[in-house]
Every structure is written in structure tokens, then in C-alpha cells.
Amino acid sequence: MYVIIAGCGRVGSGMARQLSAEGHDVVVIDEDPSSFRLLGPLFTGQRIVGAAIDWEVLIEAGIEGTDAFAAVTDGDNTNLVCALIAMRAFEVPCAVARVYDPLRAAAFAKLGVRTVCPTEDARMLMLQQLYACPAGRGE
């Protein structure tokens, strides 16, 4: 599988390392060249310095032939725009955007953008853990 990841923070670099270790072709795009240090020495993919909403950067990354695109920058708007560009302009079969704002994630999901909302996921997991606690005092 040929995958482009926009954003090389903890999530993006972790995804890139795992996909690379599994033998996939991975390209990581980030505006900050120092972020690529998180990829470690075993990462075999390509690193591109630039903005993932820049069409020239996306074309350099090989978006015209990519199987999947993951947008995990630190900005909801950037992630959503990147995913929409990948889906609509370049017909990438699978584009996923991390979106912290639950309302925005839901709105774009209705437009067909695959979204992951860590805020909503954390809320649900925290509630599960609270509900799993033994009954409180006085009950």
C-alpha cells in the first residue's frame, strides 16, 4: 500500500514507523524538518518538507498514485482540507482526517470524509472507565 501522511508529530510518526516496518511505501509531509527526527533510523519512507495543502507538495509526494492519505497535523482545518483535496481532486480511495472538534468531525463525516475525533474517543473511554468503578460511598 502507498500511504501519504500529513503531519509528523507523535501520531503521524508512529503511523509512519509502523506502516514502514510492515513493508508499505510511506511518504510523510511536514512543514518542520526537525519533526522527522521522530521517525527514527529504521524508517525507510520518504520525507517531504512542505505544507500538505500545497498541491505541488502533494504531487511531489505522489498523491496521484496513492492508496491512502492520513491527515494528522495539529490543525483541524488543515486536516479536513487535505483530506478533501485528496478525495475530491486526486480521487484517493481512502482519506482520513484527525479532527479534535466533535461538531466539525461530524459535519465533515456527513460530507463523506473519514474522521477520527480523539476528543470524542477520549470522552467515551473516560466514561467507560468511570462507569466500571465500584459504587461510591454511601450507596
Image: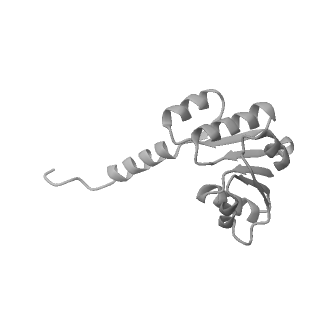
Residue that protrudes farthest toward the bottom in the picture: 41
| Residue 36: image location, x then y, percent | 69, 62
Above or below, 107 relative to 2: above
| Residue 4: image location, x then y, percent | 76, 50
- The mark total stands at 0
Q: Quadrant of residue 22?
A: bottom right
- The residue shown at (56%, 28%) is 107
Q: Residue 97 or 121: which is nearer the viewer?
A: 97
Please state if 45 lies on the left or on the right of 103 as rendered: right
Q: Residue 90 or 30: which is nearer the viewer?
A: 30
| Residue 10: image location, x then y, percent | 59, 59
| Residue 69: image location, x then y, percent | 73, 45
Please state if 118 lies on the left or on the right of 53 as rendered: left
Residue that protrudes farthest toward the left in the picture: 138
- The residue shown at (47%, 44%) is 119
Q: Quadrant of residue 116?
A: top right
Please state if 29 lies on the left or on the right of 114 as rendered: right
- The residue shown at (80%, 34%) is 91
